[in-house]
Amino acid sequence: MPAILPSTALARVLPLLLVLLGVVGVRAQDVPGASDVRALAACVEEHQTHLDRLVRLIGEAEERLTSADAAVVADARAAIEALVGRAHGVREHLRRCVDASHIPAGRTGERTSTSAAAEGEPRDVDSDAEDSVAEDGGTVHVVEADVRMADGVRVVRGERVDGTGEARDAAVRTAVHGLGAALSACYDAYRSRGGRGRGELHLAFTVGAGGRARDVAVEGGAAFDAGLRACVLRAAEPLRVEGTRGAVTFAYTFRFGAD
C-alpha cells in the first residue's frame, strides 16, 4: 500500500512558504520567484485539505474492518484501496507543483530547473491528477464528469468514495444539479465583491437514512474568498438524494468561472 504524505507535514511546510514572502517594503512582483512561491503555497494548501479528507475517510473505513459481516469488511477494504489510489493522484499533483516552481536559491539568483519546462508547455495538472485517481483507484465509482451545471459552474468530477449503502447515480446527479442556480448565485456574489478568481472547489457529503445530506464539507478553493466557500456550504447543506439506502459518501469537484 503506497504511503500517504501526512497532512501534518503539509501544515508545517505551508507557513514556511508563506514566510518567504514576508519582505517588508518590497512589492512581491519585484522579487524574483515571489509569484511561484504563492503558487506553490496555494497548491500545498489545496491538497492538504484533500489529504485531510482522504485520511478521515480511510479512518472510517478502517473501523469497519472489525465488523463480523464479511461483506462489510470486503467493502471497507475496497474503499481503503480506492482512497489510497486517490492519495497517489494527490501526491503526483503535488510533485508536479514542486517541479513547476521556479524559485531562486537564496541570494544566488539561480533558478531551479524543472522537468515541465524541459518538456515545453506544462500539462493541465488538475486534469492529470484526476485521471490518475481514476486509473489507480479503480474501485472509486464515477457518478459524472465534465458536465456543465449552471452559468459559471461546471462539474469536473463526481464520485462515490465510501459507504456500504446504495444510491442511484441518476438520483445523485439530480440532487447535485439542483444546486446549480444557488452555486451560480454564489459565484455571481463573489464577483460582485470584486473577486476575479477562477478555479476548483471540492464538496464532500454523506447521505444516509431518508437521503438527507450530513457531514457536508467544502474544501480547497484557494483562488476564492471565504464568502464564496461559506455560500456553497449553505447551498449544499439541504441536499437530499432520493431513494438512498444506507450511508454513502460522495465527493464532487466544481470549477467556477468555467464558461
Image (tube, rainbow, N blue to C red):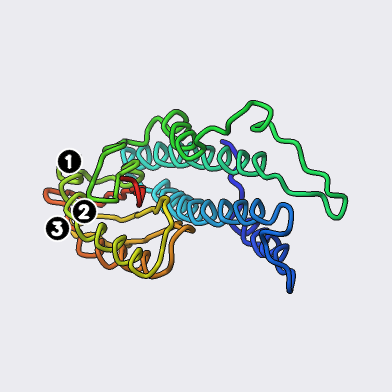
Compared to residue 73, the image places residue 21 above or below, namely: below
Of badges 2 and 1, nearer the viewer stands 2
- Which residue is found at the position 59% from the left and 53% from the top? 44
For the residues labelled 1 and 3, the Cα–Cα distance comes to 14 Å
Quadrant where the N terminus lies?
top right
Compared to residue 115, the image places residue 100 above or below, namely: below
For the residues labelled 2 and 1, the Cα–Cα distance comes to 19 Å
Residue 180 — which label?
2
Circle 1 residue? 168
Of badges 1 and 3, nearer the viewer stands 1
Displayed quadrant of residue 79:
top left
Q: In terms of secondary structure, where does tag 1 sit?
A: loop
Q: Which residue is more in the foreground, 244 or 172? A: 172
Between discs 3 and 2, the one toward the N terminus: 2
Circle 3 residue? 210
Residue furthest bottom in the image:
24
- Which residue is found at the position 36% from the left and 36% from the top? 140
**Circle 1: residue type:** Arg
Q: Which residue is more in the foreground, 56 or 105? A: 105
